[in-house]
Image: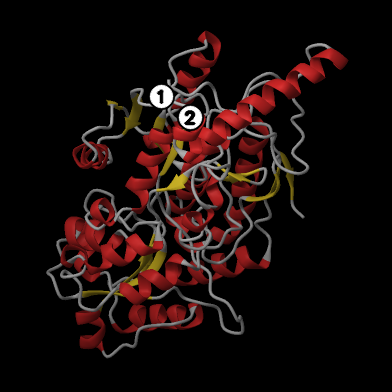
Amino acid sequence: MKSPRSLPARSRRALVRSAVAVLAVSAIAALAGCASADQSTDSGSAEFTPVTQEEGSTITVWADSTRLPAVQQYQDSHPDAKLDIVTYDGGADGSTYLQTKVQLFDRTGEGWPDVVFAPPVDVTWASQPTGPDAIPFAAPLDEDLVPQDTLDDFATGSLTPCEFNGHTYCLRNDIAQVVLWYNKTLLDQFGYSVPTTWEEYEALGEKVAAEHPGYLVGSVGDTNSHESYFWSSQCPAFDLVKPDTLRVDLQDGNCTRMATLLDNLIAKGAVSTEAFFSQGFAKDSGAKTLVAVGPSWYGQYLFNSAFAIPAGQIAAAPPLGWEGESENFTGNVGGGTWMVSSHSANLDAATDLVTWITTSDDVQAGAPTYPAFAPAADAWLANPANKEYFANDVSDAFKTAADEVWTGWSNTRFSDATAWSSVVLPALTAGKTLTETLPAWQTAITDEAKSVGYTVTQK
């Protein structure tokens, strides 16, 4: 058996923490019987105490099919790593598979995967205890697992969905920061300038509607359109003011200004209520889309793949701002996370895998979407496959937007897309305006929030 001094640094710290924890629990038991640990969140969660570590043991990794190549690449570059790789849905389309399985493992006391890929919504429950004697599924990575200087190199605000009770429970794999996409060929042909503010964007839409009817400067018909527009406007639709208190105020000026702007452009025919990704949009309107406010993946997956716009026409500009405001903010439409299980008996190996996948140029430079880790994002932008399609160098727009995602649109225990899809989109299809639909959207979000345990406030 190895001595503590010969173990990796994290393993030695885990041994020390375990020994201290045993002494502390013994002392408390002598005074107060079998009292559980203090779960107060006033100053962060209780200190993380790892299970007994088994250096060199096999770790089980759950990943979706998109991230599977990255895990396999890690295995190829780390031939001594012992991995049991399992492919699952990765939480796609609101799946609760991971949470259901973890609840089962919690009851049986075994079976937890060491590493999982999941959407940010899964971090909300995985970072919280499931009962008075339970521990969160996700391990706090900032407690001697991932160095702080590594955490600091992630894009500004990108780890906010990972942060609860003062700790960081996941590493962000990728982000989908919202930028301004435009067809440079068409804008040049029509003699239009690229807007830099929302006011200029509205004016452009009005000119397009008057001078080139049928051409578009956007769409609000997709299930995530609100993340591009209302999130970018700093609308407090999903603002966690406390861990269990959600502020929902769609009558806030930051919400109503965007609704008014979009209602104007929808009425004039410059913004569509048909989804970009709906059947027939690419054929009927793809080539007539002058501008699209949307995530960094729109370039390849909307304009290139869906609309089949030839290379050299589509360009990106930084996020729009509001006149008179000193700071610009933007939204985010996607991006996944990696979590390490608090039950892992090989935290060193599990942490090494998630750190390598999220930060290594070897994997992230060829990733399908924009890396959350800033140095890896530079490598991604240098990859010809990620820039040769475009009419300009998208680096400035992408990097600027990556650090401007507004953190007031919080990661909650429910999807922000449900109310938009079930209430707002049908209302738009029926001819109602966004402005008159805001109260119904407010009610739907509020009801869903309360159903999963949030207290809802408008202030």
Q: Residue 92: x and y, percent?
A: 37, 36
- The answer to whether the residue labelled 2 contacts the one labelled 1, judged by CB atoms less than 8 Å apart, is yes
Q: Residue 118: x and y, percent?
A: 41, 37
Quarter of the image holding residue 51? top right
Q: Residue at x 21, y 55 (%)?
A: 366
Residue identified by numbered label 2: 341
Vertical side of 373 occupied by 278: above or below: above
Q: Amino acid at mark 1?
A: Pro
Observer-nearest of 215 and 378: 378
Most extreme residue toward the top is: 108
In the figure, is residue 386 to the left or right of 129?
left
Q: Residue at x 13, y 70 (%)?
A: 311
Vertical side of 389 occupied by 437: above or below: above
Instruction: Tell me the distance, in whole angstroms, between the alpha carbons under discs 2 and 1.
Output: 7 Å
Q: Residue 251: x and y, percent?
A: 68, 60
Quarter of the image holding residue 297? bottom left
Task: Find residue 113 and name its label.
Answer: 1
Vertical side of 137 occupied by 322: above or below: below
| Quadrant of the image containing the N terminus | top left
Most extreme residue toward the left is: 310
Q: Residue 21: x and y, percent?
A: 68, 25
Q: Regarding mark 1 in the picture, which secondary structure is present there? A: loop
| Quadrant of the image containing the C terminus | bottom right
Quarter of the image holding residue 435? bottom right
Q: Amino acid at mark 2?
A: Ser
Please report whichever mark, 2 or 1, sits nearer to the chain's N-terminal start.
1
- Badge 2 crowding class, 10 Å Cα cut-off, few under 14, some 14 to 19, many 20 or more, is many
- Badge 1 crowding class, 10 Å Cα cut-off, few under 14, some 14 to 19, many 20 or more, is many
Q: Regarding mark 2 in the picture, which secondary structure is present there? A: loop
Q: Residue at x 34, y 29 (%)?
A: 61
